[in-house]
Image: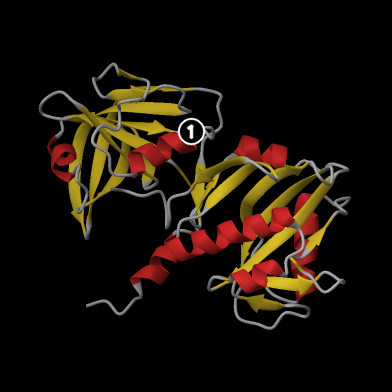
C-alpha cells in the first residue's frame, strides 16, 4: 500500500494549470450524458487521438466505457457555470444546456472554444480511473479563450486581463491564508486590515509581489478571489488569495476569522469578503466574487481540480 498522502498528492497534481472540458456521449437509450474533466490531452496527430480520464467511481463509468463514440468540449473562459453544471450530481445536466449532435453523433455544447467528436479507439484501466482514448472524426475551434484550472481555482483569461489592468482608482490586497487562518495587520487606528496598497504604478502583479515581500513570508501570488467596485470609496478593489507556508510575518499575525476578530475589521467590504472566506474555508469550496461592495455574484469553483463525478 502506498504511503503517499492522497490529499497532498492531489494538491501537488493541482498545481499544473490545465484546461477545463465537458466530455459528452449518448447512452444506450439515446439520452445525452456528460461530465466535467481537466484530465484531457492530445495524444497523436496520425492517427488523430485524444484522451481523457474518468473516475471508476463515476456514475457515468459504465455508460462511457461502453460508448462507441464521445466528444470533448473545451470550455470557453465564460463557461464556469457550465463546468459546474457537469461537475455536480444532477438528474438531467442537459435540461438547460444549448447543444446539438456532432457530425459523429456525440453532443456538442454551444459556445465552447473547441470540440472534438471521436470514435472510441481504446479504453485503458489505470488505477482508480479509466483512460478513454478517442479517434477524432470531426472537430472545430473558435476564437474564444479557453477556461483554465489550477490549485482549485478557475482561471478566466479575459476576466483576469480586465481585473489586472492598472487603474488610478485601484486597490490591491493580499488575502494570505494558512490552514484557514488569514494574515491581518493593524491598520494604524487599532482596527485590522489585509495587506493592501493603492499604489499600482508598477502594475497589479508588481503590487501584489510587493505586498507579499513586505510580510517576510514566501507566500505564493495566488488567484483573484474578489473583484468589486467600492462605490462608497470610489475605488476598484482586487483581492488575491495567496497560500503561505510556515513562517512568522514581519507585521501582523495569522488569525482565526471568528465573529470577534471580524468586528475589528473596519472596512465593511473587506469584512464581508473575510466572512465569505471563513465559510468557504470551512466547506473547502472557494469562489470568485465579482460585483460591488454591496452586491455581486460568486462564481463557484470545484475543489482539487475540476471535479470528475
Q: Point out residue 256 in the picture as x, y percentages from the top left corner.
A: 59, 75
Q: Residue at x 15, y 38 (%)?
A: 63
Q: Residue at x 74, y 67 (%)?
A: 212
Q: Residue at x 82, y 74 (%)?
A: 190
Q: Point out residue 114 in the picture as x, y percentages from the top left corner.
A: 44, 27
The secondary structure type at the circle numbered 1 is: loop
Compare residues 13 and 267 and report the one nearer the observer: 267
| Residues packed near mark 1 inside 10 Å, few (<14), some (14 to 19) or many (20 plus) | some
Q: Point out residue 209 in the picture as x, y percentages from the top left corner.
A: 76, 62
Q: How many marks?
A: 1
Q: Point out residue 162 in the picture as x, y percentages from the top left corner.
A: 71, 37
Splitting the image into 4 quarters, where does residue 81 fall? top left
Please tell me whether residue 308 is drawn above or below residue 151 in the rendered image: above
Please tell me whether residue 186 is drawn above or below residue 96 in the rendered image: below
Compare residues 222 and 18 and report the one nearer the observer: 222
Q: Is residue 261 visible?
A: yes
Compare residues 139 and 232 and report the one nearer the observer: 232
Left or right of 308? Residue 231 is right
Q: Residue at x 30, y 19 (%)?
A: 102
Splitting the image into 4 quarters, where does residue 266 fall? bottom right
Q: Quadrant of the N terminus?
A: bottom left
Identify the residue position indicated by label 1 in the image. 79
Amino acid at each position: 500500500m502506498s504511503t503517499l498522502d492522497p490529499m497532498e498528492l492531489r494538491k501537488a497534481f493541482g498545481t499544473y494549470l490545465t484546461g477545463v472540458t465537458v466530455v459528452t456521449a449518448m447512452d444506450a437509450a439515446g439520452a445525452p450524458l456528460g461530465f466535467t474533466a481537466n484530465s484531457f490531452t492530445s495524444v497523436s496527430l496520425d492517427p488523430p487521438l485524444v484522451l481523457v480520464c474518468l473516475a471508476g467511481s463515476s456514475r457515468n463509468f459504465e455508460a462511457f466505457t461502453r460508448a462507441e463514440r464521445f466528444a470533448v468540449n473545451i470550455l470557453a473562459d465564460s463557461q464556469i457555470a457550465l463546468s459546474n453544471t457537469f461537475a455536480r450530481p444532477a438528474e438531467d445536466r442537459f435540461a438547460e444546456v444549448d447543444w446539438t449532435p456532432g457530425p459523429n453523433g456525440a453532443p456538442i455544447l454551444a459556445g465552447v472554444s473547441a470540440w472534438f467528436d471521436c470514435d472510441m479507439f481504446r479504453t485503458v484501466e489505470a488505477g482508480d480511473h479509466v483512460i478513454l482514448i478517442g479517434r477524432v472524426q470531426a472537430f472545430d475551434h473558435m476564437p474564444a479563450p479557453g477556461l483554465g484550472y489550477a490549485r482549485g481555482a478557475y482561471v478566466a483569461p479575459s476576466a483576469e486581463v480586465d481585473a489586472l489592468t492598472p487603474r488610478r482608482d485601484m486597490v490591491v490586497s493580499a488575502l494570505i491564508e494558512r490552514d484557514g487562518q488569514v494574515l491581518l495587520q493593524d491598520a494604524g487606528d487599532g482596527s485590522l486590515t489585509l495587506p493592501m496598497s493603492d499604489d499600482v504604478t508598477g502594475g497589479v502583479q508588481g503590487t501584489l509581489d510587493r505586498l507579499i515581500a513586505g510580510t517576510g513570508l514566501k507566500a505564493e501570488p495566488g488567484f483573484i478571489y474578489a473583484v468589486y467596485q467600492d462605490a462608497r470609496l470610489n475605488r476598484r478593489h482586487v483581492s488575491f488569495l495567496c497560500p503561505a507556508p510556515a513562517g512568522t510575518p514581519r507585521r501582523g499575525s495569522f488569525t482565526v476569522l471568528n465573529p470577534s476578530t471580524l468586528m475589528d475589521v473596519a472596512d465593511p467590504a473587506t469584512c464581508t469578503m473575510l466572512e465569505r472566506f471563513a465559510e468557504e474555508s470551512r466547506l473547502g469550496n472557494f469562489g470568485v466574487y465579482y460585483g460591488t461592495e454591496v452586491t455581486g455574484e460568486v462564481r463557484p469553483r470545484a475543489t482539487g481540480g475540476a471535479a470528475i463525478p
